[in-house]
């Protein structure tokens, strides 16, 4: 995430926001954010959202996610929001949203759903 | 894709391979490839696979994809394979696979499914 | 849908509710609703939600959906809610939720995301 | 499944086939199979495929699945094929395919991907 230039901007129990400013490394020739960057911050936001609810000795892995790319991702920055929909002992399900922000305008550019697994130290998928 | 260091290694009608060598920019502290890099080359391989079947004036957009991360992505390089399962006039569905290759060993590390839309010049989603 | 015993209980632009009462045909030996029934009403709720926004000569087909089954679906009835997240000229994306209702208690038992395609009379996918 | 009129026609380790004959209860006015029936047998085929690889005291639950409906499902019967792609201690991932069979003709009408969880006796998701 850091290598993309993204950063955590809000952390609350079960909800995390990540912002990714527009930079040549994450945009195409037309100035749109790469789908890969959009997906990566969505996946990370969900993973961190799950992590806020897990125990201190746990780590988290993405089992799978599904994402719909709704509109060209263009703007000053992207904001990904990961929200826990259901937290379980083993599996946790998150909603993923990505907004493109340009000045005052905030457009939903991607929406997804993700399954996480909580891994105890030494445990295995 | 290029900014990740990935390159197309095989192109045939309805099937495209992409390789991504292990590099610090796309791996974590433990040497595993980032999930974001794995997903990005899977999505690209599917998009290019669809593109091989489209007309000269068309472009292609990812409508959505779903990916399962099956195992840690560790090795000399990742190989993503995108294969068209059903090509339609408007929508095309691809299978996505990502293998981690280390020496002779090839491990399936991610599997997915993707929907593409063919866009005529000037058309719109 | 009718053959399952389900019925539309709320229709507004971009949002449709469907209820499915508990009956032996749609439940298992333990009284849980079948996953197939849960998924079917979720898919239908999304399809009808999209349909509320389409033109009079259009029909709607499900391109794909993804659903997470979060908890055992047990109760007096299931309520599926389909909500349009993004309506496009060709493609529409919906959020799908299914709640199990038992007396006063309402539990989210499934959550999903769906892509629809609007089909003009005589058109084709 | 039985209430739909479906039956297991092939069981091997990691792969299960289910057939669903055309009947008024599972088809629409035009003779197409309901998407709900198509999805239900796909989900069941994957679940049973996973189950063939699990221990005697285990049961299996669908965590999530994603399915693309590729073509109208029309024919004498549907055949769903569930194939394990990756079997894990906790989670198992399956490929789902549904074919419509009419005489000699076999058409892929749906393709999907599914995550299963193996549940020990008394354990919980």
Image: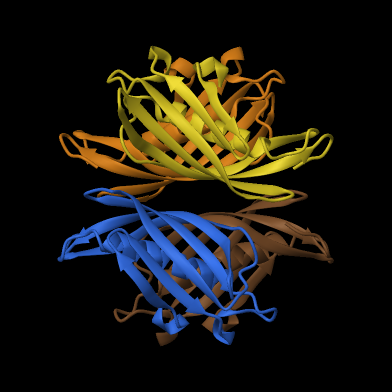
Chain colours: A yellow, B orange, C blue, D brown
Q: Is residue C25 placed above or below D120 in the rendered structure?
A: below
Q: Is residue C81 placed above or below B72 in the rendered structure?
A: below
> Percent x, y for residue B124?
20, 40
> Percent x, y for residue A70?
34, 41
Q: Nearer the viewer, residue A114 or D30?
A: A114
**Which residue is at 66% across, 79% downward?**
C31
**Which residue is at 45% across, 58% downward?**
C96
Q: Is residue B12 placed above or below B24 in the rendered structure?
A: below
The extreme front residue here reads C104
Of the 4 image quadrants, the one containing the C terminus of chain C is: bottom left
> Percent x, y for residue D88?
74, 48
> Percent x, y for residue C105?
60, 68
Of the 4 image quadrants, the one containing the N terminus of chain C is: bottom left
- Can you see residue B38? no
Quadrant of the rendered structure where residue C116 is? bottom left
- Can you see residue D96? yes
Quadrant of the rendered structure where residue C32 is? bottom right
**Which residue is at 55% across, 56% downward?**
D65
Q: Nearer the viewer, residue A66 or B98?
A: A66
Q: How many numbered marks have been drawn onto this rendered protein structure?
A: 0
Q: Nearer the viewer, residue A87 or B4?
A: A87
């Amino acid at each position: 995430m850091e290598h993309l230039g993204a950063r955590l901007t809000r952390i609350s129990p079960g909800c995390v926001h990540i912002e990714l400013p527009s930079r040549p490394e994450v945009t195409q020739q037309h100035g749109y954010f790469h789908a890969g960057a959009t997906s990566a911050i969505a996946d990370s936001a969900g993973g961190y959202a799950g992590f806020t609810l897990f125990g201190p000795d746990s780590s988290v892995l993405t089992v799978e996610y599904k994402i719909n790319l709704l509109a060209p991702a263009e703007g000053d920055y992207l904001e990904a929001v990961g929200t826990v929909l259901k937290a379980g002992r083993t599996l946790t399900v998150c909603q993923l949203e990505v907004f493109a922000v340009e000045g005052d305008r905030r457009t939903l550019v991607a929406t997804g759903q993700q399954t996480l697994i909580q891994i105890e130290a030494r445990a295995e998928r």
